[in-house]
Image (tube, coloured by chain):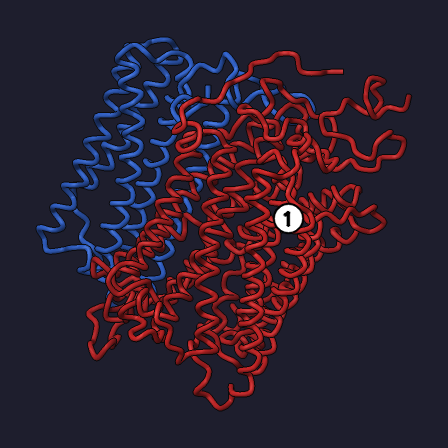
Chain colours: A red, B blue
Amino acid sequence: MSSPVVIHAHHAPQGFIRKYVFSLDHKVIGIQYYFLALFSVLVGVSLSLLMRFHMIHPEAKVAWFGTLWPTAAQGGIMTPELYLSLMTMHGTIMVFFVLTTAPQGGFGNYFLPLQIGAEDMAFPVLNMLSFWTTLVALGVMMSAFFVQGGAPLAGWTGYPPLSGIGPLAGPGEGLGQTLWIVSIAIFCGASLMGAINFIATIIDLRCQGMSLMRLPLTCWTWFVTAILGLLGFAVLLAAGVLLILDRSAGTSFFIPEGLMVSDQILNHKGGSPLLWQHLFWFFGHPEVYIAILPGMGVTSQLLSTFARKAVFGYRAMVYAILSIGFLGFLVWGHHMFMSGMSPYSAMAFSVLTMAIGVPSAIKTFNWIGTLWGGKIRFTTAMMFALGFVSLFVTGGLSGIFLGQPALDLYFHDTYFVVGHFHMIMGVAAIFGMFAGTFYWFPKMFGRMMNETLGKIHFYVTFLGVYAIFTPMHYLGIAGNPRRYSDFTNFDFLGKLLPVHHFMTQAAYGTAAIQILFFINLFWSMKYGKKAPMNPWDATTLEWTVPSPPPFDNFGGHHPVVHHGPYEYSVPGAPRDFIMQTDPPFDDPSSPNASH
Amino acid sequence: MPGSITSDIVKPPSPPRRGGFGGGGEGGGSDNRGSSRRASMTGLMVLLAATTMAFAAFTSAFVVRRGISNDWIGLPMPRVVWANTAILLASSLMLELARRALRSGRRSAFNRYWTAGTALGVLFLIGQAFAWRQLSAAGIFVATNPSSSFFYLLTAAHALHILGGLTALVYVDVQALSLQLGPGKRTAVDVSALFWHFVDGLWLFLMFLFLVWG
């Protein structure tokens, strides 16, 4: 038996500032990222509720709208421009500061070093800088609400010419849009710092015995996500620089000649708005996988843990993750079928898009294979993981329709697309976060979350999100356009209004039940049942250390790994799981050896 | 002690610190002494990949913008950029000579070469500023033509990387001249020199782009 003997424990810094604020500890930074995302999700969801309210009550006078937005909601009535700014900020905040931040920056930061047996990330100061830079980006983004003209209107995709020509394009297109681009550029810098840390940590800081094929699938997804972020955010940063030059230096990268806006002919000439679209979506499509891949990793981890079975086809899962990452860079054109691209190009992008269905199906079938014949423990964390699989399949199937140019031409500007991307990128990824929260909370805070509250929260949320987003597919098929702030003045949409009413009510209900989650989260931090070291009988390294872990993770010990990450229900073993650090199975001193 | 960017790069690898422990058995992990250096080198490679992507994006924008428009007017390249190119190449050469000197234990030669390389880096930046002056004196500004937009943009983006590289070169130089460049700081020497060679190569690529497409 090769147990670690050399102990070099490191103690946490004692000052409040170094311990909790400018901390170098990956666990504190992970929690900081998590709370940044929680704050962002509160703002993002609030904006979506305002949008849903406006869609069914476009003429409503609400006094506090007028107080909040004296110009954009004069007299308490929301203008269409205000609706567009809410849409832009909802999308931006959710995509960048929630979906990109929590799964990778939050859970990844906290659990990657623990799962690979490292004391910290490779570059702790860079890690701290990455978080604080993200916070600055969030601050700059939020400040767009409070400047003259308000928040920008150009959508989370920031399409020029609208985003490139300044205040002429409308309220929010002045300083608000500039702040948006600056914030995204800062965010890109933060993400690049994070990506460098994740990649170097996984490649170089794995403990003894932690071969690549013994990595938990969560680590594989964080690894591939970091690579996608590295390559994608660098391109978005470059595109943002070009856009800001068009706005402020009079260049014409994206602005065409002869453009007339607000009765004025612009001086720009020769630029191409499609160039922005290519650059943006070269980042934008991998961004979808940046949001969803960590959720896939958590789901794989949880299905195996709570079905008490090894992940079905571990190697196939790894190759599927790598394939999804690789193919993700070859399909950006499917966001641009409407741009007038050559049908041959469209076909190439379409075929490549369909090809992503193969690794996606491998993952789905392997999840089902993992569940098959398992002794399933229906914890809240497991329920959310199962919910993830359901949402991933639902959202993925509608993607097959949209990936075909002929169908996309019809669907592209309808609610079908809104339903699709909310299912797959929004809600599925958020279910991954909920699953991760319920699973890892005991390790992070040393206490258990309440399972009853958790289950109520799960069922209502699960039904709620389907109630919100399934009807959007029907609306899309019926031709309901997206991005409109008001459907009441169109005869052909009149019959669809009751569906919008239903969706808005469902959104209210689903948002309200999240209060239960927040109560559970904060109540359990203080009053939850004390968590043991390994409450789920799980196998990976984070469950070999106290809850919460000590400052240097392993108390100065150097863990040595002898097993794969998912050795559950191994025949002949006295208990139904083998920790990764357990001695080799044939070792007579092993707790798993038959005596 | 928790590490930091600089301490990860420059502190001696023992006694064991955060990160990088474990043995090389069974396929994973690394030994105690090499992991910090390896992580720094990996971090550098990853950083270079990101920089490459950003410049690839600029390049594709350059090629597309030139291809779709009929308003592109070739930029008269300021002559000083040729001198600047030679200065940058000489700078890289100096750093390489410095590394060789360090490997063979000739510390004073290392100091001389490294200081010369750093000074040439500063000279390159001054030369680039001079190129900008020449262009603006000729009435060619950022928004004059897409070719000038790209020239200013790409040279500015490259200069930012040069500034980052110079920070590292100056740091190593100060350590060397104050006799504090211990064996643990060899990683800092290698990382900063490799980054410098990269931005040198990047400049050659940009020159190629300006000459062939500009």
Q: Is residue A11 above or below residue A567?
A: above
From the top left corner, tell me how far across and down residue B27 is, in percent. 67, 26
Q: Measuring 49% from the left and 12% from the top, which residue is drawn there? A: B14
Q: Quick one: which residue is furthest to the front in this view?
A: A527
From the top left corner, tell me how far across and down residue A410 is, in percent. 54, 79
Q: Secondary structure at mark 1?
A: helix
Q: Quick one: which residue is furthest to the left in this view?
A: B137
From the top left corner, tell me how far across and down residue A535 is, in percent. 71, 35
Can residue A444 be seen here? yes
Q: Quick one: which residue is furthest to the bottom in this view?
A: A491
Q: Is residue A388 above or below residue A113?
A: below
Q: Is residue A402 left or right of residue B53?
A: right
According to the picture, the residue beneath numbered tag 1 turns out to be A435
Residue B131, by quadrant, is: top left
Depth order, front residue of A71/A3:
A71
Chain to which the residue tagged by mark 1 belongs = A
Q: Is residue A46 left or right of residue A500?
A: left
Quadrant where the C terminus of chain A sits is: top right
Depth order, front residue of B61/B43:
B43
- How many numbered discs? 1
Depth order, front residue of A309/B193:
A309
Q: Classify 10 Å Cα crowding around label 1: few (below 14), some (14-19), many (20 and above).
A: many
Q: Is residue B22 left or right of residue A70?
A: right
Q: Is residue A76 above or below residue B211?
A: below
Q: Amino acid at mark 1?
A: Ala
Q: Measuring 68% from the left and 59% from the top, which residue is drawn there? A: A459
Residue B22, by quadrant, is: top right
From the top left corner, tell me how far across and down residue A309 is, in percent. 80, 42
Q: Is residue A413 left or right of residue A63?
A: right
